[in-house]
Amino acid sequence: MFGLGTPELMVIFAIAFLVFGGKKLPELGSGLGKAINSFKKGMRDVEESGKELVQEVPGVKEIAAVKQEVDNVKTLGGVIGK
């Protein structure tokens, strides 16, 4: 995890405890967790909309079928060559 060991993390947590106090840390952790979840959800939404957009572009399905056929031929060539 970024080259941080247990002693370094304990120092970081101790400094955070001194700066924010014991009552504020759970609120900060909760806010951070919500922010991470929101970011992940946004990334999933963008990824899904990108897949839908790719499927709407003319010729994408045909290109995918040709790529699959080329991969199949490469696999057969490797098996026959052995």
Image (tube, grey):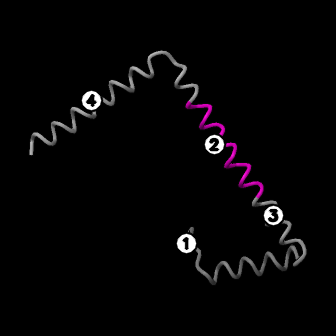
Q: Give the crowd class for mark 1: few <14, some 14-19, many >=20 residues within 10 Å.
A: few
Asked whether the residues under the numbered discs 1 and 4 touch, taking CB atoms below 8 Å apart as contact, a structural biologist would say no
Q: Is residue 49 left or right of residue 66?
A: right
Badge 1 marks a residue whose secondary structure is loop
Among numbered discs 1 and 3, the one appearing first in the sequence: 1
Q: Which residue is mark 2?
A: 44
**Which badge, 3 or 2, is on the more N-terminal residue?**
3
Within the image, what quadrant is residue 44 found in?
top right
What is the spatial separation of the Cα atoms under label 1 and label 3, in whole angstroms?
A: 25 Å
Q: Nearer the viewer, mark 1 or mark 2?
A: 2
Q: Position of residue 4 (x, y in %)?
A: 59, 74
- Asked whether the beta carbons under mark 1 and mark 3 sit within 8 Å of each other, the answer is no
Asked whether disc 3 touches disc 2, contact meaning CB atoms under 8 Å apart, the reply is no
Asked if residue 19 is positioned above or below residue 62 in the image, the reply reads below
The quadrant of the picture occupied by the N terminus is bottom right
How many numbered marks, from 0 up?
Answer: 4
Q: Which residue is mark 4?
A: 70
Span shown in magenta: 34-51
User: Residue 81: x, y in percent?
Assistant: 9, 41
Callout 3–callout 4 Cβ contact below 8 Å:
no
User: What type is the residue that disc 2 sits on?
Assistant: Arg
Distance from the alpha carbon under mark 3 to that under mark 4: 49 Å
Residue lying at the far top of the rendered structure: 58
Tell me the number on the disc at residue 3.
1
Q: Tell me the tag on residue 30.
A: 3
C-alpha span from label 1 to label 4 = 42 Å
List x then y, in percent, for residue 22: 87, 78
Which quadrant of the figure has residue 69?
A: top left
